[in-house]
Amino acid sequence: MKLNTKGIIFVISAPSGTGKTTICERLLKSLPDLKMSISHTTRKPRTGERDGVDYYFIDKTKFKEMISNNDFIEWAEVYGNFYGTSKKVINELLNSGNDILLDIDTQGAKNIKKIYPESVLIFMLPPSIEELKRRLSKRKEKSNIIKSRLDRVVDEIIQYEFYDYLLINDNLEKALNEIMCIIFAERLKINRINKKFINNFLKKI
Ligand code: 5GP
C-alpha cells in the first residue's frame, strides 16, 4: 500500500566518473516503482548506448527547436553538448504515479528544485580526486575531453550546498544502500502522505 499518491522526483548529480550510471541502473532494477527520466542530448552515443534507453539522441537543430517550443523543463550545455529534461517525459512519469530518477548536472538540479521544491537532490562524491582521475582515464575518450571533465569537477563539487543529501561512492553496495535509505525515508515523510488515506483509516474505527 502506498501512503503517498504524488510521485517524488529524485535527482542524482555527481562529477563524471563517480559511478552514477551504475548506481542508477542498480536502483532501477531494485525499485520497480522508480522510473528513469530519459534526457535528450546532442552528444553522440557511446559504444553500447541506445536511443530511447540511455538518451534520446538528437541533433542541434532539433534541440534548438525543442527549446523554442518550450519543450524542456530545464536544459544545459555540458562539455559542449546540450542536455535537456523534457516536460512530456516528466509529466508522463509523474502521472503514472511512479517516482522519478534524474541523472542531471548541478545546473539542471538547481532548476528542478526551483520548479519542484519537493524534489530531493542527492550529490555523490568519488572516494578521492586520485580515484576520479583513474576512473576517467580508463574511459575510451580523448584526453582533451577527460581534461575538460576534470576541470569541471571543482565547479560541480562547490555546488553541493544546494543539495539535500551528500554521499561518497567509495563502495558501490554501501552507496546504493544509502540512496535506498534516502528514497524509503522520503517516501514516508509526513508532508508527502495523502491525508485521505489517514481519514479513511480513521473512519473504519
Ligand atoms: P554524459 O555525457 O556523461 O552522459 O553526461 C554528462 C553530464 O550531463 C552528466 O553530469 C549528466 O548528469 C548531465 N546530464 C544528463 N542529462 C541531463 C539533462 O537532461 N539536463 C542536465 N542539466 N544535465 C544532464
Image (spheres, rainbow, N blue to C red):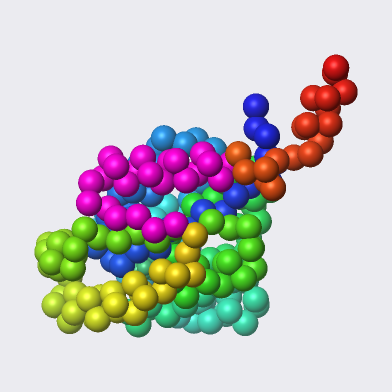
- Rendered-image quarter of ligand 1: bottom left
> How many numbered tags mark residues here?
0
x and y, in percent, of residue 120 in the image:
54, 56
Q: Residue at x 50, y 35 (%)?
A: 32
- 184 inside magenta stretch: yes
Q: Residue at x 44, y 65 (%)?
A: 104
In the rendered view, tell whether residue 36 sits above or below residue 40: above
Image quarter of residue 136: bottom left
Q: Say which of 72 and 11 sits in front.
A: 11
Q: Is residue 114 left or right of residue 44?
A: right
Picture quarter with the N terminus: top right
- 183 inside magenta stretch: yes
x and y, in percent, of residue 153 in the image:
28, 74
Q: Residue at x 34, y 43 (%)?
A: 176
Q: Residue at x 39, y 58 (%)?
A: 166
In the rendered view, tell whether residue 75 sits above or below residue 91: below
Q: Say which of 149 and 178 sits in front.
A: 178
